[in-house]
Amino acid sequence: MAIYILQKLGYALLTLFGVVTVIFLLFTILPGDPARMMLGQNETAEQLAVVKKKYGFDQPVYVQYLRYLNDLSPVSFHSKNPDDYTFLAEAVPAGRQGKYNATDLFSVGNTTLVLKTPYLRESFQKNGKEVSEVIAETLPNTVILAVSAIVIAIFIGVFLGIISVLFKDGFVDKMIQLVSTLGMSVPSFFSAIIFAWIFGFMLHKYTNLNMTGSLYEVDDFGNGKYIQWKNLILPAIVLGIRPLAVVSQLMRNSLLEVLNQDYIRTAKAKGLSFYQIIKRHALKNSLNPVVTAISGWFASMLAGAVFVEFIFGWNGLGKEIVNALNTLDLPIIMGAVIVIATLFIIINIFVDIIYGWLDPKISRQ
């Protein structure tokens, strides 16, 4: 089992390394000067030179790439020379105005090996605000939205799957399958527009729901922020539509397969009702493929929430990515993609380890 876990961790590190490499090269070779993006339209040649030197934009691509890896790595090398990009002030917990939160390990000559939190650099458009701060402020909202959506998908999807089996090949079953197919095929951004227009605008006086709004809203009378839970309803439903449709279909097919097993026939022969058979025997054994699908969908929702958040005005990481794309704030885009990829990898590793623990045959492959 230990070797299996080490293999998964090794694959995860290679995958993350590939994601970081692709993201860096993609946004480095794009047309445009990062220094000009930071300074705006009224820059001077001297200002451009200072910014390029400070952030290393004047170096070759491979040097910038190695520095980026050094910034992201929790164990990294730093110079004691104040004029060097990797300079880290000694005896200061966070050198360079909070650039690193580091602990010195040992020094060799003019170079120090440190243990630090990964540095995602600074935003181009938010007055030098660190990308990690932006992500820390917005990611919790995205996680809340994703968890709410997956809970909706599980409960409603499992319920619809059971109803489909109860009315197999009947009108109700066919309607549920039709709705599930539509749910899987309709893009989330289109569903978001339709739901916001119908339930947030046309039926607002009945639903009391808003077309846009985030989890926290500012009080009009200066009493600070307060939580507005009703703003979570529409985006959570829209984000949960596609996994709900998948769960419904998987639950139906899995339950039908389980009901054809020998032990179900034995339960019928003992006189158990159809409801008792499903509740006591079939339901639990039918949930395995559903759990598998949900684990993958939860990780995907962190990335899939981008347009849903933007349309509903939900102040999460997805909306922040769209805003960063509009303003060409490359550090935020790169940092957000790397964080989402890391979470995706961690969740999948966790699921693989659970599978390996539940089924030892998997860990031996």
Image (cartoon, grey):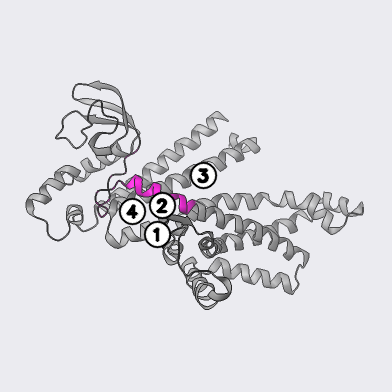
To which residue does mark 3 refer?
347
Q: Looking at the picture, which amino acid does disc 3 mark?
A: Ile
Left or right? Give the position of 54 relative to 241. Answer: left
CB atoms of marks 1 and 3 within 8 Å = no
Front position among marks 2 and 3? 2
Q: Looking at the picture, which amino acid does disc 1 mark?
A: Lys
Q: Which residues are magenta?
A: 118-143
To which residue does mark 1 refer?
319
The local secondary structure at tag 1 comes to helix
Quadrant showing the C terminus:
top right
Q: Which mark is residue 96?
A: none
Residue 341, x across and y down, in percent? 42, 48
- The tag earlier along the polypeptide, 2 or 4, is 2
- Residue 80 occupies which quadrant of the picture? top left
- The tag earlier along the polypeptide, 4 or 1, is 1
Q: Looking at the picture, which amino acid does disc 2 mark?
A: Thr
